[in-house]
Image (cartoon, rainbow, N blue to C red):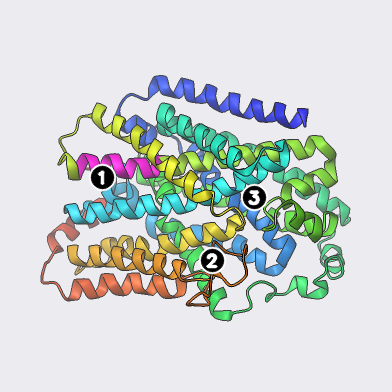
């Protein structure tokens, strides 16, 4: 316990030192929102990977694989393949068209308050959804490691993430993410190596042993243990593969570099790191199933979120357990800081700066607004996370991916690739995608279950789908298409302008 507490203090102290030095360099809106665009490709690639490899990846997927076998690995596959969509569809055009937020990209073509306002609303909603998952993981982790109750744990993480953003902005957030990425990869590699050694460094031997190592027996290696509904499985994978390209906290990372080629380099670096990490989640899950056991995992946390730290304890004793838990803690801190920043940027830059102040807000006013928004977003996320304690964090993040793919991706794609697309289509597509995804989640088994304690509320769900993606993602595209066709407004000239910018990298001031 003393070792664990010491490592936690080192992590917190180190990140606060970073924040202190970053705060001295964070004066302008550009420095606060995007670190002045001064990160190199490899730095931003590490930061993107650090931002992306969240509690869902490290804690949630390991738990899912340990408890459900192959079905848990769906998350690893989906999260990794998603970066191909980002690389080939979104990265360069976004960097050329935007400045601070996702709404900037869309506003480059549709200079309309309604478009910017709805895009900002989407960013805030998705960021809060995603943040709930991180805070749930944080609560379970600190409860297991330090013996603090769940509510206190969530409040500690919530307070720290707010400090990083309010004082250090994107510079502090980026360096916390870079350091966390290195620590997470190192910790995951160490555990994976030990697990692989237990199976005599033989993959076939590992798979053979897993056929009898869990209560699921041979079924552990096949799909169908958790996702018994084929439609729900497709829905989940659609959300995972398409959702990353609509996540605001990932998209704003492309503004922290100087140009589009560097943005592409960032994604390539991030994809290699993320790919290696998700391959290793298989070892984490198999190791937890074989050497910790389902009963111990479920006893520590019913959703399986503590499988990786428990595996570290089983293989390396208290020190490795403390180190891995501290790394997981750093993981959560880094990701939630990025989420708070993306939501605060959407509020301060888009709502306050462009809609309320009509572009006349001073830099000082925008930064102050962003800091106040950071506090507000943190409070809302903390309150909501207190009701989601029993849900798996990978599962919660999958819901955020579904909302992102439904509300943001259709408009981003049509903005760059469809000449006929117009303002009405953009607003319609974003609202239809957002509302349909949220409504489908609210009436789903995630919220309602006849058995008390299995969901947020007791009752019968109106639909059986646990992930809305298969319905809400097409609805987002259809809404954008129908809204465009039923409107006479044309934006062809603006389209020609943004295509030039997207292809040549010309950066205009928005």
Question: Which residue carries the number 1 mark?
Answer: 350
Residue at the spot 72% in from the left edge and 49% down from the top edge: 308
Magenta segment range? 341-354
Question: Which residue carries the number 2 mark?
Answer: 446
Q: Is residue 127 left or right of residue 3?
A: left
* Among the 4 quarters of the image, the one containing residue 455: bottom right
In front of the other: label 1 or label 2? 2
Residue at the spot 52% in from the left edge and 25% down from the top edge: 18
Q: Secondary structure at mark 3?
A: helix
Question: Which residue carries the number 3 mark?
Answer: 58
Residue 68 in the image, given as x and y percentages of width and height: 71, 67
The residue closer to the viewer here, 360 or 448, is 448
The quarter in which the C terminus is drawn is top left
Q: Is residue 225 above or below residue 163?
A: below
The quarter in which the N terminus is drawn is top right
Residue at the spot 41% in from the left edge and 54% down from the top edge: 126
Q: Of label 1 and label 2, which has the lower sequence position?
A: 1
Q: Is residue 280 left or right of residue 287?
A: left
Q: Residue 491: which numbered mark, if any?
A: none
Label 3 Cα neighbours within 10 Å, binned few <14 / some 14-19 / many ≥20: many
In front of the other: label 3 or label 2? 2
Q: Secondary structure at mark 2?
A: loop
């Amino acid at each position: 316990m003393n070792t664990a507490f010491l490592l936690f203090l080192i992590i917190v102290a180190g990140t606060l030192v970073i924040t202190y030095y970053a705060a001295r360099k964070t004066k302008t809106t550009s420095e606060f929102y995007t670190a002045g665009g001064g990160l190199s490709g490899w730095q931003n690639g590490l930061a993107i990977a650090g931002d992306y490899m969240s509690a869902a990846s490290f804690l949630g997927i390991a738990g899912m694989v340990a408890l459900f076998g192959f079905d848990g690995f769906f998350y690893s596959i989906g999260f990794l393949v998603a970066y191909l969509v980002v690389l080939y569809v979104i990265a360069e055009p976004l960097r050329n068209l935007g400045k601070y937020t996702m709404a900037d990209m869309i506003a480059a073509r549709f200079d309309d308050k309604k478009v910017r306002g709805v895009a900002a609303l989407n960013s805030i909603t998705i960021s809060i959804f995603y943040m709930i998952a991180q805070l749930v993981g944080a609560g379970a982790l600190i409860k297991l490691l330090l013996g603090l109750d769940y509510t206190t744990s969530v409040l500690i993480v919530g307070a720290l993430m707010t400090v990083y953003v309010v004082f250090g902005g994107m510079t502090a957030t980026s360096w916390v993410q870079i350091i966390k990425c290195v620590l997470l990869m190192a910790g995951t590699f160490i555990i994976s190596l030990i697990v692989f050694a237990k199976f005599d460094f033989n993959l076939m031997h590992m798979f053979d042993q897993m056929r009898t190592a869990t209560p699921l027996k041979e079924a552990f290696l096949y799909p169908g243990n958790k996702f018994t509904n084929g439609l729900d499985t497709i829905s989940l994978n659609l959300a995972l593969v398409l959702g990353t390209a609509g996540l605001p906290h990932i998209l704003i990372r492309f503004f922290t570099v100087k140009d589009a080629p560097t943005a592409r380099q960032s994604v390539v670096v991030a994809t290699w790191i993320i790919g290696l990490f998700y391959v290793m989640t298989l070892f984490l899950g198999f190791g937890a199933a074989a050497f910790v056991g389902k009963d111990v995992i479920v006893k520590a946390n019913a959703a399986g979120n503590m499988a990786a730290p428990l595996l570290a304890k089983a293989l390396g004793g208290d020190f490795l357990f403390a180190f891995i838990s501290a790394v997981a803690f750093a993981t959560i801190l880094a990701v939630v800081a990025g989420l708070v920043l993306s939501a605060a940027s959407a509020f301060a830059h888009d709502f306050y700066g462009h809609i309320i102040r009509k572009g006349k807000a001073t830099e000082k006013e925008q930064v102050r607004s962003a800091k106040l928004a950071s506090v507000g977003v943190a409070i809302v996320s903390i309150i909501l996370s207190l009701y989601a304690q029993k849900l798996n964090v990978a599962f919660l993040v999958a819901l955020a991916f579904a909302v992102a793919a439904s509300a943001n991706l259709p408009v981003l794609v049509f903005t760059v690739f469809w000449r006929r697309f117009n303002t009405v289509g953009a607003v319609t597509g974003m609202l239809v995608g957002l509302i349909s995804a949220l409504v489908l989640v609210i009436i789903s088994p995630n919220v309602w279950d006849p058995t008390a304690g299995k969901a947020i509320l007791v009752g019968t769900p109106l639909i059986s789908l646990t992930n809305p993606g298969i319905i809400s993602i097409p609805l987002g595209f259809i809404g954008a298409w129908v809204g465009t066709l039923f409107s006479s407004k044309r934006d062809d000239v603006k389209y020609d302008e943004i295509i030039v910018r997207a292809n040549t990298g010309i950066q205009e001031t928005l």
